[in-house]
Image (tube, rainbow, N blue to C red):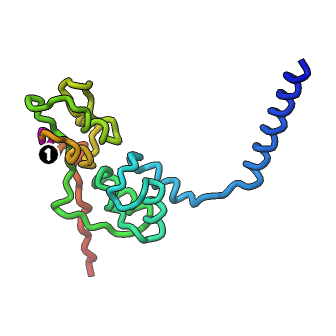
Amino acid sequence: MISVIFFILLGGFLGAALGYAAIKFRVDSNPLVDKIEALMPGGQCGQCGEAGCRQAAEAMVKGDLNPASCPPGGAALSSAVANMLGVSLEMNEEDVQWVAHIDEANCSGCTRCYKACPFDAIVGANKQIHTVISDVCTGCQLCSNACPQNCLEMKKVAPDVSVWYWAKPKTELAT
């Protein structure tokens, strides 16, 4: 009975000490970095050249990374980050969104593609046909290199209201 009381008191003391240490030694982060990180897809794919989305957001705030350097985020994320940072962003015609497409007739169900997908956009079981949930797919292209049967390809997303990039109107100053 004494040992139970001892461990309860020890746990309470250690919990209080950790709570105090968390408050006393808290490191405040840049709120702009937190906002940009919240906008990012969060797949930690590394296509921007950084280890993860947090590191990419920090590099964008420092100015070391272009706001358009996140392929899974697409044009919408690039525009939002550029607006938050107060920088101009030129959108090119080649800035299109991609979505994975699996040729289900040739899919052997090796499971390599959905293991490579950080967004869980590919569904299927071992030795069964796999398919892509196009609404979830961000077009990061990590799955395209993982398929040994070459039955997975990236296709351009047909523009519609949800993915279309509307250019800002050009304003001319009247003199």
Q: Is residue 153 above or below residue 90?
A: above
Q: Residue furthest bottom?
A: 175
Image quarter (top left, top right, bottom left or bottom right) of the N terminus: top right
Residue drawn at x 38%, y 63% as measured from the top left: 82
Answer left or right for 126 relative to 46. Answer: left
Up-down: is 18 above or below 52?
above
Residue placed at 27% from the left, 47% from the top? 142
Residue plotted at (70% across, 54% down): 26
User: What count of labels does the image hold?
Assistant: 1
Q: Position of residue 170 (x, y in %)?
A: 24, 68
Q: Position of residue 75 (x, y in %)?
A: 28, 55
Bin the neighbour count of mark 1 within 10 Å (Cα to Cα): few under 14, some 14-19, many 20 and up. few
Q: Residue at x 79, y 46 (%)?
A: 20
Which amino acid is tagged 1? Lys
Question: Where 169 falls versus 40 (above or below)?
Answer: below
Question: Where, by quadrant of the figure, is residue 90 drawn?
Answer: bottom left
Quadrant where the C terminus is found in the figure: bottom left
Residue at the extreme right of the image, as rendered: 2
- Secondary element under disc 1, as helix, strand or loop, is strand
Give the residues drawn in magenta, as a range: 150-158
Residue 44 lies, in percent from the top left, at 40, 49
> Is residue 43 rendered to the left or right of residue 105?
right
> In screen coordinates, is 160 left or right of 4?
left
The front one of 4 and 69 is: 4
Residue 150 lies, in percent from the top left, at 12, 42
* Quarter where residue 114 is shown: top left
In the image, farthest residue toward the top: 1
Label 1 belongs to which residue? Answer: 155
Splitting the image into 4 quarters, where does residue 146 fall?
Answer: top left
* Nearest the eye: 6 or 138: 6
